[in-house]
Amino acid sequence: MSDTFLAHAPRRTFAIISHPDAGKTTLTEKLLLYGGAIHLAGAVKSNKARRAATSDWMEIEKQRGISVTSSVMQFVYAGTRFNLLDTPGHQDFSEDTYRTLTAADCAVMLIDAAKGVETQTRKLFQVCRMRNTPIVTFINKLDRPSQDPFDLMTEIENLLGIRCVPITWPIGSGEDFKGVYDRLTRKVHLFRVQSKGSSVAEVDVTDAKDPSLEAILGERQWLQLQEDIDLLDAAGDGFDLESFRSGEFISPVFFGSAMNNFGVGNFLDHFIEMCPPPGPRATDTGTIETSDKEFTAFVFKIQANMDRAHRDRIAFLRVCSGRYEGGMRVYHVRLGKEMRLSRPTQFMAQERSAVEEAYPGDILGVFDPGTLRIGDTLTMGSSRMFEGVPRFSPEHFARLRVKDPMRRKQFITGLSELVEEGTVQAFAVKGSEKDPILGVVGALQFEVLMYRMEHEYNAPCDLESLPFTHARWVTGDDASPEALERARYGTCVYDSDGQPVALFRSEWELGSAQRDYPKWTFHPAAPLIKATLSGRK
Ligand code: G4P
């Protein structure tokens, strides 16, 4: 495929959300295989043993066998260029995933056919709903004994409140798994076990009305299929592309077995039609269309020390409009100054390649000398800002102390860099600003922080847990966490933008404050605030 072709191909930018073990790594790898980005499955990471080797950058990930950071991968399928944002699947480490989802236009919700909707799926689903991100469902592992597909649909609808529209429908499961029926093309795709599906699978496709199908499926499964087709058709709710793309509560549903490459090609054939193209994005002064000539982008993730040998720091940008060209100077809206994007790169797992041009939907990684922050907007000169990348309410709080006072300088540098990267949130306490309270959504984030302080900044630390459980940004007439503190409801601290935040020790304490101050709103995440206006054009 020529570079020019790649450059101008339509874009689709999406992420996969799932509970650990549902098969996200496997599906990612198979999508890359079908997109020709890899030639033999196993090249990315196919099992826990290999997992450490490629897409995990940080030492801690290797040790724990989990993916803490996210990467971005590209593949081209049927002339469309897909940007797949990889999100960490570990239950505890979700803030990074949440932020990554703000850069995606669509999510694929991957569900294990035996386990149904699991906790992490629910959390990530809620984040997608907050942003009206359209969600396509892929139900995996049909080659294993699975729940009844009608029960799975009901479970998804009841637990997640989204209407399911099956696009494919399974014929049996486990040892009886015979394939899927495609409701749009009215064809049956027959399943064959692929020994771990290391290359693109050939699938036998036959018409659902094919007289020989009964002999292939056996009478029982053939009759069951006819009955299921009638039931689904009678339910009558077809798939409406426009409502789906506009983020209404419907999800097209596919069935397959990623490990066996089964259902992956068929899924991509439909997904390419369904996945919305990069769309308009809201800013503080109205919407930016992808067709706007001006280049605009926002930072959704910062990763320090990705290459330990070079101690670099990379900011990931999502292009929203216009066209990026190599060497271009851009306008950093928050700081009100021009900057050059240094060595923009795209990522394929661990490999990086230089980028000469990028279009809306693309993700760029740029070397950042410390001027970019999560949520920053870059333009060609206008001073509009994209609506913030959400910050989530921490649930665990602690103070960090450097073990060796001689290493205080490294400690301060490390902590401020990791706070900017979003590994933890820091809250200043009046009178002891140098000793902030740190907050995280998942307790594992503290472990990551301690590990990185020791290994990347050579500043081993002790962690002192604090008894807070909730952080709330308070708005409303005369709303003030300072006043709350005076009235002995919570403790008042200040976030990195200087906004006061109330920390509570329990659900009960928060509940009392809410009851006694009914006119105030207690936000679990920082409401959008405009950064420094000085210097903006
Ligand atoms: P994750 O990234 O969501 O955590 O899941 P991952 O792809 O690592 O898959 C978790 C386990 O489920 C792996 O097995 C994987 O092989 C298996 N798996 C994925 N898709 C399918 C499928 O369609 N059918 C079946 N039967 N299994 C599937 P593992 O034993 O943990 O590792 P491995 O040694 O098999 O790779």
Image (cartoon, grey):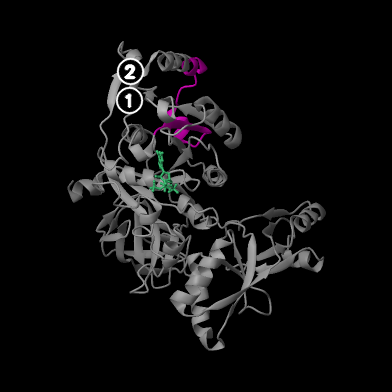
**Residue 30 placement (x, y as % from top left):** 32, 43
Between circles 2 and 1, the one closer to the viewer is 2
**Where's ligand 1: which quadrant?**
top left
Residue that carries the numbered disc 2 in the rendered image: 216
Q: Determine the secondary structure under disc 1.
A: strand
Residue that carries the numbered disc 1 in the rendered image: 190
Separation (CA) of disc 2 from disc 1: 9 Å
> Tag 1: Cα neighbours inside 10 Å, few (<14), some, or many (≥20)?
many
Looking at the image, is 292 positioned above or below residue 509? Answer: above
Determine if the magenta segment contains residue 249: yes
Residue 341 figure quarter? bottom left
Circles 2 and 1 in contact, beta carbons < 8 Å? yes
Q: Determine the secondary structure under disc 2.
A: helix
Q: Is residue 234 left or right of residue 361?
A: right
Q: Is residue 19 left or right of residue 159?
A: left
Residue 402 figure quarter? bottom right
- The boundaries of the magenta stretch are 231-256
